Image (cartoon, rainbow, N blue to C red):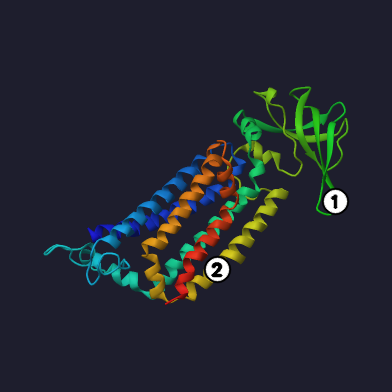
Amino acid sequence: MRSLLIWVVRLCALVGWVATAVACFWLLGATAMPRPWTEPYVWGAVAVACAVVRVLALWGLRVLPGENRTPGEPVSLSKVADRRSVSGSVSLSEALGFSFSDLDEARGWIKLRTGAVWALVAFASGAFFVALLTSANAGEKLDDLRTAGAEASTATVVGGPQAIREELTDEHAVKGYVSRLVVSVPGGPGRLPVRGAYTYDRPRAGTEVDVLWARSAPELGGYVNESKNLRVLAEARWNAFADDELGVASLLAFLVIVVVFGGVLGVVFTLAPQADVLQRLAGSAPFQTVRAALAVAVFWAWSPTLLGHEAGVLQLLLAGASFLLVLLGYVCTSVRSFVR
């Protein structure tokens, strides 16, 4: 039984790592697609399921008595799995002629495994922040347009723009204008309404603007935003770090979080602690439970956004802070690695 649980812990760790990486990769460019974002949701669900099953297996190992330990003592993920659990039976390691416990206890492997976890933490935090930063590329209006087959065209403003409002920088300089427009699309509607149009220059009759609209559903109106690459949004496919203002900003933010925060923290918490301490924490049911609970909370917070449903206040708050929660959660559960 212990041998089976140990293999469950190992396999769930591997599958969970891969599933988390794939889910976060999809999340990097998901906002350019119409919702629901099925791919990151499914892979995220697999990752969370693996985290929960792994924790249950660790608690099972903690409860079961083993060699040289009593129930409730810290769990070792090695040694037991590679011995004969039943008299006369042959373990997998013996059949292969290789001892997995030797690999588990190798100092270099422990450090490499810990580094891989921190690399994933950094990548996930960056992906969450990018998704939040580019969330303006998603929304009910854009989802409806892309689902209806959106296309980008150059249109002409007809009539006088209404409800013009200046958008200011932190230094109170004008950076753009938000207005309500009516545009004429060549080969399309002669009068297409556009609410909340964002332009760098003050709009006037006769001004040409790029507009996102759906030929099959002109009643949806149009979408104008000169800070975005509308042709990329019209393609409705995965696209990370688009060639526009938001794409450049999200790339810089991603690099800062992954390299500066995640990279530095990963190096510190991987190289500074002793390997045997890292090994004990990897098999600690209480600490891994905290991390699994964090994964469940983040997935629950992001689920409405991924599926295109309305999110509650708590879910919005957790999703907004998810990139920080992931970093802080792993830092707090790793501090003990400095205590021998």
- The image quarter containing residue 305 is top right
Please state which of residues 141 and 303 is positioned toward the viewer in this rendering. 303
Residue 35, given in percent of the width and then of the height, sits at 56, 37
Identify the residue shown where x is 62% and y is 51%.
Answer: 130
Please state which of residues 248 and 135 is positioned toward the viewer in this rendering. 135
Residue 141, given in percent of the width and then of the height, sits at 66, 32
Establish if 144 lies above or below 127: above
Label 2 Cα crowd, 10 Å radius (few <14 / some 14-19 / many 20+):
some
Q: Is residue 203 something one can see in this rendering? A: yes
Residue 6, given in percent of the width and then of the height, sits at 29, 61
Front position among marks 2 and 1: 1
Q: CA distance from mark 2 to mark 1?
A: 37 Å
Q: Is residue 309 left or right of residue 189?
A: left
Quadrant of the image containing the N terminus: bottom left
Quadrant of the image containing the C terminus: bottom left
Establish if 121 lies above or below 141: below
**Of marks 2 and 1, which one's residue comes earlier in the chain?**
1
Label 1 Cα crowd, 10 Å radius (few <14 / some 14-19 / many 20+):
few
Identify the residue shown where x is 31% and y is 56%.
Answer: 57
Establish if 224 lies above or below 271: above
What's the mark number on residue 193? none
Identify the residue shown where x is 87% and y is 31%.
Answer: 206
Label 2 sits on residue = 265
Label 1 sits on residue = 172
SS class of the residue under badge 2?
helix
